[in-house]
Image: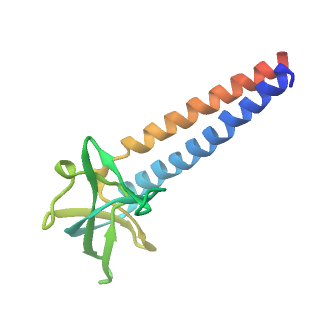
Amino acid sequence: MSPSSALGILSLAFGVPGTVLGTASYHKVRQARRLLRDGARAQGVVIRLEAMRMQGGGADDSITIRSTGTTAYAPVVAWSTLDGRAMETTSSLARPLARTPSAGTRVEVRYDPADPSKWMLPAGGNGLWWIFVGLGALLTVIGLGLGIGALYA
């Protein structure tokens, strides 16, 4: 395999996933900004905490997500839309127990009135999504650099 072919393959291996990661993450940042700016407000209450699990290859086929040595929890929030629809939604952001609102805590919810399944807790922030945007941009730049290197190799 020639050096330019290897660089071309590496360029695609870094550039394509970086572009997908960066674009998808930036979409989440824009969605959150839109909800914070234009979303309807509702008062909700955390009714329970849900331990987040992901599929794994272990004996019981699951792995508990660990964060700073503790299980990560996502708040399940009960709230009502402005037109009176009762909602019970689970946050997509899981955190250690010390950083998660406990059951019974009142929280503000921002949601899209046209599609209440698009919602967020404003206190959740966008920091994590910005990290993914940066990581995607970094991988894309590495891929572009490798692609330029393949052209001149």
Residue extending furthest toward the top:
153
Asked if residue 12 is positioned above or below residue 87 in the image, the reply reads above
Side of 117 relative to 90 (left or right): right
Q: Residue at x 63, y 27 (%)?
A: 141
Residue extending furthest toward the front:
59
Total numbered labels placed on residues in the image: 0
Residue extending furthest toward the right:
2
Is residue 81 among what the camera can see?
A: no
Q: Residue at x 15, y 60 (%)?
A: 102
Q: Residue at x 86, y 22 (%)?
A: 2
Q: Nearer the viewer, residue 105 or 84?
A: 105
Q: Position of residue 54 (x, y in %)?
A: 42, 58
- The N terminus: image quadrant: top right
Q: Position of residue 82 (x, y in %)?
A: 30, 77
Asked if residue 44 is positioned above or below residue 27 in the image, the reply reads below
Q: Position of residue 95 (x, y in %)?
A: 28, 50
Q: Quadrant of residue 59?
A: bottom left
Side of 81 relative to 56 (left or right): left
Asked if residue 114 is positioned above or below residue 96 in the image, the reply reads below
